[in-house]
């Protein structure tokens, strides 16, 4: 059993990257339990918290850049693709878009915590021509807050998570 745990610990960075990339890309897989577990493992010294954050932020930004680029490149057609892939009606875009236009960067931060909304926020940022540097700064900040919150909670709540 310890061989399996050691093997998972050695490849934890790659597993975490792929899992977060899928989650932030819109695949309905929960990232929060993985981040909690990674934070708990970091509190025992099995993983490094300093390594977890850049891995998770890098994965989240990779997914964001794909959706942002699609929105910027295809505009409304790119948004239609996002909604089709997420199996959401086009009417949902009409409800989300005005809120995004009013609260752009707050929307991107909140969307990070709602996995299916994250691709929508990134694609909307591209489609509404948010400057790439502004988008990267806000996406990086929101990814850091999101990763830090979940992994930090795991770090602090290790006793309740790891038995």
Image (tube, grey):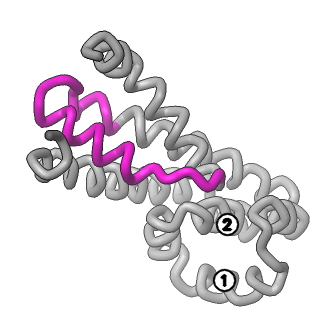
Whether 113 is drawn above or below 54: the answer is below
| Disc assigned to residue 50 | none
Whether 113 is drawn above or below 46: the answer is below
Q: Residue at x 84, y 79 (%)?
A: 90
Q: Residue at x 11, y 30 (%)?
A: 44
Q: Main secondary structure of the magenta part?
A: helix
**For numbered disc 1, what is the local secondary structure?**
helix
Residue closest to the far top: 3
Residue highlighted by disc 1: 96
**For numbered disc 2, what is the local secondary structure?**
helix
Left or right: 84 in relation to 128: right
* Near-viewer residue (66 or 156): 156
Left or right: 31 in relation to 42: right
Residue highlighted by disc 2: 120
N-term mark: 2 or 1 = 1
Residue 101 is situated, as x and y percent measured from the top left of the image, at 62, 82
Residue 133 among those drawn in magenta = no
Place residue 153 in its image quadrant. bottom left
Contact? badges 2 and 1 (CB < 8 Å): yes
How many residues crowd around disc 1 within 10 Å: few (fewer than 14), some, or many (20 or more)?
some
Residue 89 is situated, as x and y percent measured from the top left of the image, at 82, 79
The quadrant of the rendering that contains the C terminus is top left
Left or right: 113 in relation to 63: left
How many residues crowd around disc 2 within 10 Å: few (fewer than 14), some, or many (20 or more)?
many
Residue 11 is situated, as x and y percent measured from the top left of the image, at 41, 18
Q: Residue at x 16, y 45 (%)?
A: 155
Residue 53 is situated, as x and y percent measured from the top left of the image, at 32, 39
Q: Residue at x 58, y 40 (%)?
A: 62
Which stretch appears magenta? Answer: 27-53
* Near-viewer residue (153 or 146): 153
């Amino acid at each position: 059993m310890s061989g399996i745990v050691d093997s998972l610990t050695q490849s934890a960075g790659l597993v975490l990257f792929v899992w977060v990339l899928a989650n932030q890309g819109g695949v309905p897989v929960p990232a929060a339990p993985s981040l909690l577990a990674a934070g708990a493992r970091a509190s025992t010294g099995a993983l490094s918290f300093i390594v977890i954050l850049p891995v998770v932020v890098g994965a989240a930004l990779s997914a964001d850049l794909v959706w942002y680029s699609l929105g910027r490149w295809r505009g409304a057609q790119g948004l239609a693709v996002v909604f089709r892939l997420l199996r959401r009606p086009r009417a949902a875009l009409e409800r989300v878009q005005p809120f995004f236009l009013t609260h752009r960067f707050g929307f991107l931060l909140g969307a990070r915590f709602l996995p299916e909304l994250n691709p929508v926020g990134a694609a909307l940022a591209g489609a509404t021509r948010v400057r790439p540097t502004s988008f990267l700064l806000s996406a990086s900040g929101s990814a850091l807050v999101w990763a830090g919150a979940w992994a930090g909670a795991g770090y602090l709540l290790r006793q309740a998570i790891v038995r």
